[in-house]
Image (cartoon, helix red, strand yellow):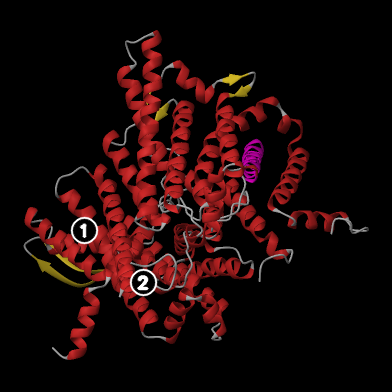
């Protein structure tokens, strides 16, 4: 192995992501051993499909957290985007491109509204997003009466199914809308954060806003971008969720925002800003998905699922905090 | 500014509003009162309306106090609702299993024991929160996210998601009875708010809490055992959630793992609206109570006007942004 690879591997070995990976691999092999169902293609595809909604939102939230902010209004944004987009599609007709364009437009606009409140009125992001969550959600239910939409356009209900292949006798798999959207969201977020100048600026702003401002970064523009990105992801996730559920239920998404926060912070993103990776978010999401899926496959009542998720969150964040403290005291002594 | 001679009324109101959150809130409350009095008329001031307001406020009020304590220290406690439900289910389980067939002193004893057990559960959750936050150094939002999920899991797992209901008369009285026309639950709120206010403003412990919220590191270097203070603070926050549990289960005459989930964000909203700095260090119980009254007045008035409770949510959100923006708009914001 060349020198640089060894160095980068030993850096990886000390990272949060490495330990997450170890835990996930241990959990997966244990579950694969205990239940033959776990490591089947069907189960893996089902997992990806059912966690796409949380995953896409988690990527949006990752960018917000790296920028040093927080947003919990995204479930309300998603509810609004879902309802308006599919109402328009039902009334006037639409195709894939137009529904995504509308949902992305609505999400982006609501996200930008958050950024304007945060930046122009200088209100902390947590307050703004608590307020806008209530505003978006309250107005949506007020105007729609909370009615579900059960009839979706045929082409939307059918979804998409690419690269279909057979596995075993009677099951076929393919890339569906959920998996495609999740993969694209990962790719775009990774590119944004790691391969663009803007990504560097977002990390810098989250690390130290004053310093970033003095370097001449356009803080307001970056905030608009970051919160709009969260909104865009909420818009995309909302369509993915509606397609999976085959209905639009304006009341079911709000209340799930902390699940998404859990996935992102399990992945090592800091609430103080400036820290977080796409790989970490992927692993955090995987850990939650594998855990919840494993509990069901092991025959434990799903009533107990939050207990295990809570334990894993507590142990993981405690271990991370503890190891950081050890490292700090060691570096002080050295 | 106060002795400026020819200030017009609106200008004077803006000046008053920008002189502090409590003043802003009082102005807002008066304005709301006038507007709703014109829109609704006498019905808005009827005994029934006032009493129903007084019945609805306590549980949210006590939970908001629990949230406020954590916020003052620069933290957050996302686990209050889950703690309340877990301790409520504990109390409910003990009441429904041991009360039937008992009478008199035995029944009273079991009721007291059941509530004590509920408080013990709440205290344990608080100890866990406090230990993880103060001694392991986990950020409060993450630690309490973990305990929130954990408590919810325990509550759902143990109760199978079922409702436990049917409690003895004295318990139901806590949530539904009145003393000289004043709801008993409101008295419970007062008995929580007063000691908390005294503790925060008149004891060394309270001073330390504000100091930690302003600058934890400086407080530690000045010789305060910040860890011990934080641990106690999270136990107190949890115990308040335990009190809220009693009020909640008494009012509904039942307990469930999913009650009051929508309250979590509303407690943050109430606290911040009441002038509690979400980054810690500033805020008074009086401001919080004013904010609660404002939220309740809007909610009750909308109810009388037959407007959707969801419109109430939206208006609450709008008011939060408006009040948070007052210092900025009046040019008094830092920077």
Q: Residue at x 48, y 53 (%)?
A: B224
Q: Residue at x 63, y 52 (%)?
A: B275
Which residue is disc 1 drawn over? Answer: A290
Q: Is residue A331 magenta?
A: no
Q: Position of residue B23 (x, y in %)?
A: 73, 49
**Left/right of residue B290 with respect to residue A163 in the rendered view:** right
Dividing the picture into quarters, in which one does residue A160 lie? bottom left
Please identify the residue farthest to the bottom as the structure is shown. A2
Whether residue A260 is visible here, answered yes or no, is yes
Q: Is residue B131 above or below residue A25?
A: above
Circle 1 SS class: helix
Q: Is residue A72 above or below residue A120?
A: above
Q: Is residue A56 above or below residue B142?
A: below
Q: Is residue A77 above or below residue B84?
A: below
N-terminal of the pair, mark 2 or mark 1, is: 2
Q: Residue at x 43, y 64 (%)?
A: A271
Which residue is disc 2 drawn over? Answer: A276
Q: Nearer the viewer, residue B210 or A301?
A: B210
Q: Nearer the viewer, residue A142 or A234?
A: A234
| Residue range of the region highlighted in magenta in the rendering | B287-306
Q: Label the magenta part by its dominant secondary structure.
A: helix
Query: Rounded to the nearest whole Å, what is the CA distance between mark 2 and mark 1?
Result: 21 Å
**Left/right of residue A180 with respect to residue B178 in the rendered view:** left
Q: Chain letter for mark 1, please.
A: A
Quarter of the figure that contains the N terminus of chain B: bottom right
Q: Position of residue A99 (x, y in %)?
A: 43, 69
């Amino acid at each position: 192995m060349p020198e640089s690879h060894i160095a980068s591997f030993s850096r990886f070995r000390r990272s949060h992501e490495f330990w997450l990976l170890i835990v996930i691999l241990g959990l997966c092999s244990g579950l694969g051993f205990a239940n033959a169902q776990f490591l089947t293609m069907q189960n893996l595809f089902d997992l990806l499909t059912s966690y796409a909604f949380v995953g896409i939102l988690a990527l949006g939230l990752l960018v917000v957290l790296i920028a040093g902010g927080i947003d919990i209004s995204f479930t309300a944004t998603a509810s609004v985007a879902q309802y308006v987009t599919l109402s328009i599609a039902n009334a006037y007709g639409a195709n894939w491109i137009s529904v995504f364009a509308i949902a992305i437009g609505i999400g982006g606009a609501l996200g930008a509204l958050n950024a304007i409140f945060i930046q122009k009125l200088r209100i902390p992001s947590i307050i703004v997003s608590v307020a806008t969550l209530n505003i978006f959600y309250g107005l949506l239910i007020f105007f729609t009466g909370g009615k579900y939409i059960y009839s979706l356009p045929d082409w939307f209900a059918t979804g998409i199914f690419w690269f279909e292949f057979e596995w075993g006798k009677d099951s076929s798999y393919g890339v569906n809308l959920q998996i495609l959207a999740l993969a694209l969201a990962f790719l775009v977020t990774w590119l944004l954060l790691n391969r663009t100048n803007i990504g560097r600026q977002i990390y810098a702003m989250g690390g130290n806003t004053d310093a970033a401002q003095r370097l001449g970064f356009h803080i307001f523009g970056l905030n608009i971008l970051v919160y709009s990105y969260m909104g865009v992801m909420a818009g995309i996730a909302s369509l993915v969720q509606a397609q999976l559920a085959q209905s639009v239920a304006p009341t079911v998404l709000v209340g799930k925002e902390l699940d998404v926060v859990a996935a992102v912070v399990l992945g090592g993103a800091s609430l103080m800003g400036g820290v977080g990776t796409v790989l970490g978010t992927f692993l955090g999401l995987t850990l939650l998905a594998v855990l919840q899926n494993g509990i069901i496959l092991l025959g434990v009542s799903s009533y107990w699922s939050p207990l295990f998720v809570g334990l894993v969150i507590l142990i993981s964040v405690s271990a991370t905090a503890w190891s950081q403290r050890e490292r700090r005291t060691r570096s002080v002594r050295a | 500014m106060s002795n400026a001679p020819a200030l017009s009324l609106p200008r004077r109101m803006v000046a008053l509003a920008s002189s502090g959150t409590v003043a802003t809130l009082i102005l807002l409350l008066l304005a709301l009162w006038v507007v709703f009095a014109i829109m609704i008329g006498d019905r808005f001031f009827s005994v029934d309306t006032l009493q129903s307001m007084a019945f609805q406020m306590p549980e949210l009020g006590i939970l908001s106090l629990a949230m406020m304590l954590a916020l003052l220290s620069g933290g957050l406690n996302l686990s209050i609702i889950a703690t309340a439900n877990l301790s409520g289910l504990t109390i409910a389980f003990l009441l429904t299993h041991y009360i039937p067939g008992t009478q008199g002193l035995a029944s009273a004893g079991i009721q007291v024991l059941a509530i004590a057990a509920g408080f013990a559960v709440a205290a344990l959750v608080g100890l866990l929160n406090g230990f993880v936050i103060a001694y392991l150094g986990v950020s409060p939002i993450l630690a309490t996210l973990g305990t929130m999920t954990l408590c919810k899991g325990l509550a759902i797992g143990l109760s199978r998601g079922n409702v436990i209901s049917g409690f003895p008369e004295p318990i139901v009285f806590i949530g539904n009875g009145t003393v000289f026309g004043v709801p008993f639950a409101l008295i419970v709120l007062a008995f929580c708010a007063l000691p908390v206010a005294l503790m925060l403003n008149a004891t060394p412990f309270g001073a330390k809490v504000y100091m930690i919220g302003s600058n934890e590191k400086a407080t530690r270097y000045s010789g305060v055992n910040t860890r011990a203070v934080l641990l106690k603070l999270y136990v107190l926050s949890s115990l308040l959630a335990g009190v809220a549990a009693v009020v909640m289960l008494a009012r509904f005459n039942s307990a469930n793992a999913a009650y009051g989930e929508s309250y979590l964000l509303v407690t943050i909203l109430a606290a911040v609206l009441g002038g509690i700095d979400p980054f810690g260090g500033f805020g008074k119980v009086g401001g919080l109570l004013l904010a609660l009254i404002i939220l309740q007045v809007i909610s009750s008035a909308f109810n009388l006007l037959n407007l959707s409770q969801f419109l109430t949510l939206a208006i609450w959100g709008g008011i939060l942004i408006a009040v948070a923006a007052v210092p900025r708009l009046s040019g008094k914001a830092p920077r």
